[in-house]
Image (cartoon, grey):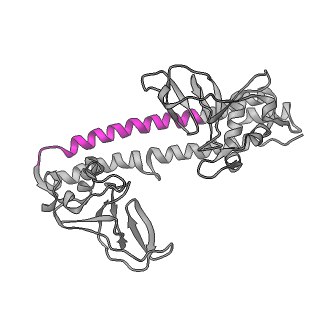
Amino acid sequence: MSRIQELIKEKCPNGVEYRKLEDVCLLQAGDRITTAMMNESYYFDVIGGGIFSTGKYNNYNREHCITISRAGSAGFVNWQENKFWATDVCFTASVNNDYMNIKFIYHYLKKCQADLQQHTYGGSMPKLNKLYLWNYLIPIPPLEVQEEIVRILDKFGELETELETELETRKQQYEFWRGKLLNRNGNIFKISQLTNNISSGKCSSRNTHGKYNVYGSTGIIAQTNEYCYETEKILVARVGANAGFVHIATGKYDVTDNTLIIDLKDNINTKYIYYYLQNYNLNKIARGGGQPLITARQIKDLEINIPSFEVQHRIVNILDKFDKLVNDIYEGLPAEIELRKKQYKYYRNKLLSFKEI
């Protein structure tokens, strides 16, 4: 950081000038393209109002520039390094002078993204106020200062990308070994043979405050002052878009009626069954269109490979370590990625806060 501090002290000790965005870069709206014109076999990403590519096209109209969503996720700022097709639901910004670094503008707009997202209009399909964007004020430090700031902030981005690539690799390894370990030689049982009961929750009392957790289809969703369960059990979302989602409830708690409760017999490792059901992807057995449903009977009829209790325990220990590495938001790679994001935001805000002349 000493290098940038020295540069600022030397080049702009009294602050910098601010100018309108339209005065420091070329701002354009993308060009219209229809779904019928796109094909997954084409080469160039199509960037629209969303965060990610909406498809592929056989031509491109932009590269190495900033995209700002003008509709949908209006105000979202992203950087596009490669050639792509910008649709008419996004704006693009590129440099047309020799005193601005386009990545500097990107980092500054990313810092101000929340502000841009507040200046939208429209109901179900928010749109970014074009006049507000065109007149948005951008600091203009000397080019050498801009380039040093870009170098520092890009480094944080590279570290985050490396960690995300590592996480994706570890996830693939985890899924491979989970399937491998859970399908070793053992005896085949129906889940009904391994359980005392499978039933729906019945919790009707829930609040934002209470002594005990209330579990729903996606995990803890509320609190209550009365509990019905106090032993570890597997829960399966039984209805809706999350049907088939598997998690474990612990402590004293209650469960809503959109969730199945699997009460296992004593000689079965709960975590082993949890990992097995997770690996099975229960969502594929859900029935129904608008409101997918999984029944207790469907779960009971599933066949599962059960090795000895000792082998179950060893498999769980291995999968617990993998699971912590790839999913734990307090430890492992997700925690490291979150730390890098916070560091990037901290230094971005610190480096891009210029006193105005």
Farthest bottom residue in view:
226
Is 179 contained in the magenta span? yes
Residue under the image location 36 percent in, 74 percent down: 203
Residue under the image location 40 percent in, 70 percent down: 214
Residue under the image location 47 percent in, 46 percent down: 334
Q: Relative to 312, is 24 on the left or the right?
A: right
The percent position of residue 10, horizontal first and vertical second, equals 85, 31
The percent position of residue 273, horizontal first and vertical second, equals 23, 55
Q: Relative to 45, is 65 on the left or the right?
A: right
Is 26 contained in the magenta span? no
The percent position of residue 221, horizontal first and vertical second, equals 44, 65
Given residues 235 and 168, the one toward you in this image is 235
Tell me the magenta residue range.
Answer: 157-186
Secondary structure, magenta segment, majority class: helix
The percent position of residue 162, horizontal first and vertical second, equals 50, 33
Image quadrant containing the N terminus? top right
Looking at the image, can residue 228 be seen? yes
Q: Is residue 14 above or below residue 284?
A: above
Residue under the image location 65 percent in, 35 percent down: 153
Q: Is residue 321 above or below residue 261?
A: above
Q: Relative to 213, is 345 on the left or the right?
A: right
